[in-house]
């Protein structure tokens, strides 16, 4: 299956190539800021809307003649797109989203959209060809032979001084085998994810574990004189610490979501209001550390890539306080209750596993909305006309409900 995805590779430029990268990043930043400033001044003084052209940038900034012209062109287009998005938001009654100036900081990026489509022209002489920089050494952890068509590439500089190249391309993926299994997934803080069959993915608490060391590095930066080399060295050490923390979290989430997509054909989750949950200042840091939104985002695109289905149920469903055996909804149910016994049927419940089972039941009710055997899929929360047939027996059965009479083909 051919999908459009980004392949990120680590670049190892020479001193001259790194200098050219920095020039292109600076040119893109200056061009973007110049477009925003010009539009604001013309509208304030003359009441007109004007879109600057990238050809004019080199007249105002002669040093840009040494830089990649595509980086400047893309920056100008990005500024125009930012204003279009803002105007669209204003029409919808949302005043937020005004384009902001880009700061001159340790990190930055620029994009080149005029790249050769053939991967053999991009990867040559043991390196990757970057316009204005030549062939740059790199290291990749993915199979580059599956790249079929190059769309554009983005050069990024991190706060720790590393350079990466993100290649947007058409990539050939191998389809995963169908397992015929379905699962309900409950996201939490004690455990990052809990499945309806009792599997629990540990919450590694990366931020909490590294918080003590990060505080020491932040204190070290604050005690250095501004503009000094020692302050810059301390800032780099802090950036490396944050980078390691982010890499650990990213690696763990990628492995977790990939294993779920490999093991199950249908995954049912809740449509959580993460923004509202973060307003609880007692739990905001823990919720952000677990990365609820990132887990759902990865599940969405991986299910789309590998032909699996992601079903989202309403956030208002009382999944945690409903007995999965008899359907009783508990009253006075708070976060401190981790295990409970149903007063109606006497069933002992683990809070998270019971919620995952209820999420699975609700997801199945959304899919099996009639008794004809046809399945109506709500992929990523929206109804799809595509039907889904289970060729093998399901590993999870619906509990006692009105859907018990549905034929599953077992």
Image: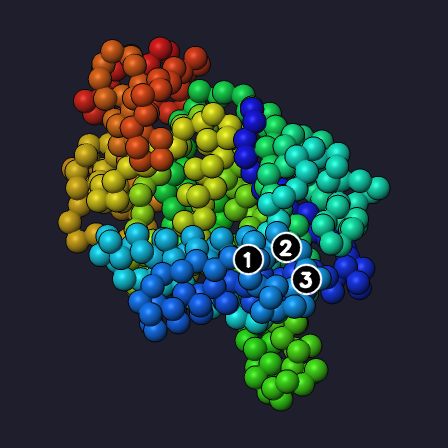
Residue denoted by label 1: 54
- Give whichever of 165, 89 is nearer the camera: 89
252 left or right of 375 in image: right
> Is disc 3 placed on a helix, strand or loop?
helix
Q: Residues within 10 Å of mark 1 (few under 14, many from 20)?
A: many
Determine the image quadrant of residue 216. bottom right
Q: Is residue 173 above or below residue 356?
A: above
Local packing at callout 3 (Cα closer than 10 Å; few below 14, some 14-19, many 20+) is: few
Identify the residue position indicated by label 2 in the image: 69
Residue 85: image x %, image y %? 36, 53
Q: Residue 17 or 353: which is nearer the viewer? A: 17
Q: Quadrant of the C terminus?
A: top left
| Quadrant into which the N terminus falls | top right
Give x and y (percent) for residue 124: 80, 40
Residue lying at the far right of the rendered structure: 125
Q: Position of residue 23 (x, y in %)?
A: 67, 64
Q: Is residue 75 above or below residue 150?
A: below
């Amino acid at each position: 299956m051919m999908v459009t995805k980004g392949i990120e590779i680590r670049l190892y430029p020479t001193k001259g190539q790194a200098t050219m990268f920095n020039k292109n990043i600076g040119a893109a930043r200056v061009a973007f800021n110049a477009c925003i400033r010009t539009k604001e001044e013309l509208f304030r003084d003359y009441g007109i809307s004007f879109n600057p052209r990238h050809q004019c940038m080199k007249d105002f900034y002669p040093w840009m003649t040494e830089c990649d012209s595509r980086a400047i062109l893309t920056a100008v287009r990005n500024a125009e797109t930012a204003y279009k998005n803002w105007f669209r938001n204003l029409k919808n009654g949302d005043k937020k989203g005004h384009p902001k100036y880009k700061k001159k900081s340790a990190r930055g990026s620029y994009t080149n959209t005029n790249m050769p489509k053939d991967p053999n022209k991009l990867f040559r002489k043991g390196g990757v060809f970057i316009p204005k920089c030549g062939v740059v050494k790199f290291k990749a952890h993915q199979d580059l032979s599956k790249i079929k068509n190059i769309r554009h590439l983005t050069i990024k500089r991190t706060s720790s001084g590393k350079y990466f190249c993100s290649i947007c391309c058409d990539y050939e993926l191998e389809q995963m085998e169908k397992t015929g299994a379905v699962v309900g997934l409950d996201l939490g803080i004690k455990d990052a994810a809990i499945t309806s069959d009792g599997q629990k993915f540990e919450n590694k608490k990366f931020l909490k574990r590294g918080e003590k060391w990060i505080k020491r590095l932040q204190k070290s930066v604050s005690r250095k004189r501004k503009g000094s080399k020692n302050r810059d060295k301390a800032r780099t050490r802090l950036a490396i610490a944050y980078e390691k923390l982010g890499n650990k979290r990213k690696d763990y989430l990628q492995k977790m979501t990939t294993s779920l997509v490999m093991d199950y054909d249908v995954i049912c989750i809740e449509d959580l209001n993460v923004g509202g949950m973060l307003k609880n200042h007692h739990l905001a840091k823990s919720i952000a550390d677990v990365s609820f939104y990132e887990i759902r985002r990865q599940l969405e695109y991986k299910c789309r890539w590998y032909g699996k289905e992601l079903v989202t149920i309403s956030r208002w469903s009382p999944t945690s306080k409903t007995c999965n055996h008899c359907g009783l909804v508990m009253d006075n149910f708070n976060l401190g209750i981790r295990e409970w016994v149903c007063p109606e049927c006497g069933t002992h419940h683990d809070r998270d596993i019971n919620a995952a089972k209820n999420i699975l039941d609700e997801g199945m009710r959304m899919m099996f909305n009639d008794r004809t055997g046809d399945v109506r899929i709500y992929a990523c929360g929206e109804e799809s006309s595509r039907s889904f047939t289970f060729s093998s027996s399901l590993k999870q059965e619906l509990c006692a409900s009105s859907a018990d009479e549905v034929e599953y083909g077992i």
